Image (cartoon, rainbow, N blue to C red):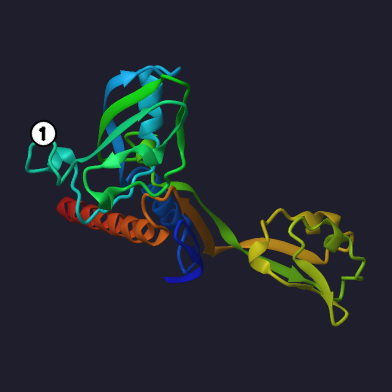
Amino acid sequence: MKVTTLELKPNKAVLKIENTKPYFVNSLRRIMLSELPKLAIEDVIIYDNTTPLFDEIIAHRLGMIPLPTDLKLLTFRDQCTCKGKGCPNCTVRYTLSKEGEGVVYSGDLQPEEKSWAIKEDKIPIVELTKDQRLILEVEAILGRGKDHAKWQAVQAPAYKYYPIIEIDHKKCDLCKKCIEECPKNILEIKNKKLSVKDIEKCTLCRTCMDVCEKNAITVRGDENKFIFRFETDGSLTAKEALLESASILEKKYEELGKLLKKLK
């Protein structure tokens, strides 16, 4: 297997994965969605809420705020030595107290330790008018996307077959219909021949094939080569999410291997 990084940003990654099959790439996608852990608010204690929103709505909005997650420092509460009581090894606490006209933002949540300060600090929670207030305390714990969407660090992981575009220059009469109809504008005439200028942008829509009256273009996907892309909500960087997901997948393959050996 060969993996090439096409784009890597703090919250986004695009990879080219070669010499593998769809089941493996889809397994990685499923791990990102359901098994990758992240920190999210689980328990909310509201001391005073005179805002227009019910306590339950406030709690739901708090739960969806992306929190910075350090998987090396935290453990799952049900696996912690504190036996679920909630200690610094499994629980991160925040407080919020705001009164008077204005908007309550995610950045108004104050952590016990500065290292857990929320980076996406401009997410609106509720708008206050004069004499309204919101005072609360929350506890955040690790969880997985399969338990609740608030623990889903990766958004919309997707893959596609790597495009293969074959042009029969003997049949092509340079009518330019395919160039005009291509939604991604990846076809051009160069040196009196039809050519592809950025094949990785091809979505395999086959519009060029449909409009070509000479049947000079063939578009298909490489079944052993893929473009894989995903974004994170900011709780983990794209690199962290990828490496942790790959590690989880590796452990699951190892576990499966051990179970299969017992069957022999």
Q: How many marks?
A: 1
Seen from this angle, which residue lies furthest bottom?
Answer: 191
Other residues around mark 1 within 10 Å, as few (<14) / some (14–19) / many (≥20)? few
Taking depth in this image into account, of 59 and 183 the one nearest to the observer is 59
Q: Which residue type does callout 1 highlight?
A: Lys
Quarter of image, res 51: top left
Image coordinates for residue 95, horizontal then vertical, percent: 27, 34
Taking depth in this image into account, of 194 and 43 the one nearest to the observer is 43
User: In the picture shown, does residue 140 fall above or below 131?
Assistant: below
Quarter of image, res 135: top left
Horizontal side of 197 relative to 175 (left or right) equals: left
Image coordinates for residue 4, horizontal then vertical, percent: 48, 71
Classify mark 1: helix, strand or loop: loop
Horizontal side of 172 relative to 142 (left or right) equals: right
Horizontal side of 254 relative to 201 (left or right) equals: left
Which residue is under mark 1? 85
User: In the picture shown, does residue 19 fall above or below 260?
Assistant: below
Q: Which quarter shows the C terminus?
A: bottom left
Taking depth in this image into account, of 14 and 261 the one nearest to the observer is 14
Image coordinates for residue 68, horizontal then vertical, percent: 33, 49
Taking depth in this image into account, of 11 and 262 the one nearest to the observer is 11
Horizontal side of 100 relative to 246 (left or right) equals: right
Quarter of image, res 50: top left
Image coordinates for residue 10, horizontal then vertical, percent: 44, 60
